[in-house]
Image (cartoon, rainbow, N blue to C red):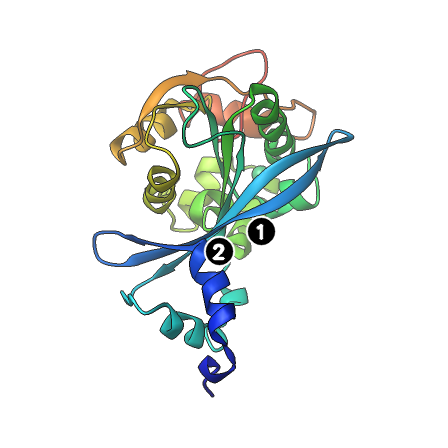
Amino acid sequence: MSMTQSLNPKVMMFLKEKVKLIKTNNKVIYLVGPIKLPVSLFEETVQFQWYCWLNCKEVAENFERIIDKLSSANLAEIQQSSVLIHGDFESADDALIRMHSICHTGDIFGSKRCDCGFQLKTAMKEIAKHGTGALFYLANHEGRGIGLFSKALAYILQENGFDTVDANLKLGFVDDSRNYSDAIYVLKELRTKPVKVMTNNPKKLEALKQAGMNIAERVELWGDVSEYNQNYLKTKITRSGHLEGEGCCND
Ligand SMILES: [Zn+2]
């Protein structure tokens, strides 16, 4: 059933104002925002601007056509990525960025098996402190790109002696299958000036550079070390090429 009839011109006008079409190599990204998002962060309320994007194979200049298809697209089954912007992101000379990979267990439940939840909050706090920046929340990066169900299987293998890298390999996945190209298209739409990237992972930095990101500097992001994630963090240093510091970071 078509919804278009119910979209009056005024509704379309509001939506059109906030939706940008970004053409990529063989598809299109619809970016919606900015949307005001006051966020509770370490007992303070910080103002962020929120954008969300949708990746489409069909390039349709006609936005009504896209809206029309949304109701039957089952978008809740395929989670979308989004980004929180703080400060004058487009124009400020200096901006701090974190490309955060979704972690259902760490970010939502606060699992201590990894340090993702701690890193997410710390990155947001650092961006707010810095004055200008962006936190990209990448929804297709669960378990370094293997998905939540496979991550649960990998956790079972880890409980039986395999390290993080081996567990993924034994399940038939490559160790790290994360892709940053859509996020970088979105970043370029929001800011063309160089950015400082928060990561302890040189491979990730290299992947971001390869994907065309304009990087001025790398900034370290210390993690939350506990008895529950020691092995996980050690694996990141010894097997995934992370730099060692006082703590270690989950990238
Ligand atoms: Zn995690």
| In the foreground, 90 or 122 | 90
Q: Residue at x 70, y 39 (%)?
A: 110
Which of labels 1 and 2 is toward the front? Answer: 2
Residue 92 percent location from the top left of the image? 44, 23
The answer to whether residue 34 is above or below residue 216 is below
**Residue kind at label 1, given as amino acid type:** Ala
User: Which residue ends up furthest to the right in the rendered image?
Assistant: 43
Residue 113 figure quarter: top right
The answer to whether residue 149 shows anywhere in this view is: yes
Secondary structure state at the residue bearing disc 1: helix
Q: Residues within 10 Å of mark 2 (few under 14, many from 20)?
A: some
**Residue kind at label 2, given as amino acid type:** Gln
Q: Residue at x 41, y 18 (%)?
A: 218
User: Which residue ends up furthest to the bottom in the rendered image?
Assistant: 1
Q: Residue 152: which numbered mark, if any?
A: 1
Could you give the CA–CA distance between mark 1 and mark 2, rounded to whole angstroms?
21 Å
Q: Residue 201: which numbered mark, if any?
A: none
Q: Residues within 10 Å of mark 1 (few under 14, many from 20)?
A: few
| In the foreground, 81 or 66 | 66
Q: Residue beneath label 2, please?
A: 80
Rendering quadrant holding ligand 1: top right
The answer to whether residue 112 is above or below residue 59 is above
Secondary structure state at the residue bearing disc 2: loop
Mark closer to the chain start, 1 or 2: 2
The answer to whether residue 215 is above or below residue 67 is above
Residue 30 figure quarter: bottom left
Residue 122 percent location from the top left of the image? 62, 26
Residue 230 percent location from the top left of the image? 62, 25
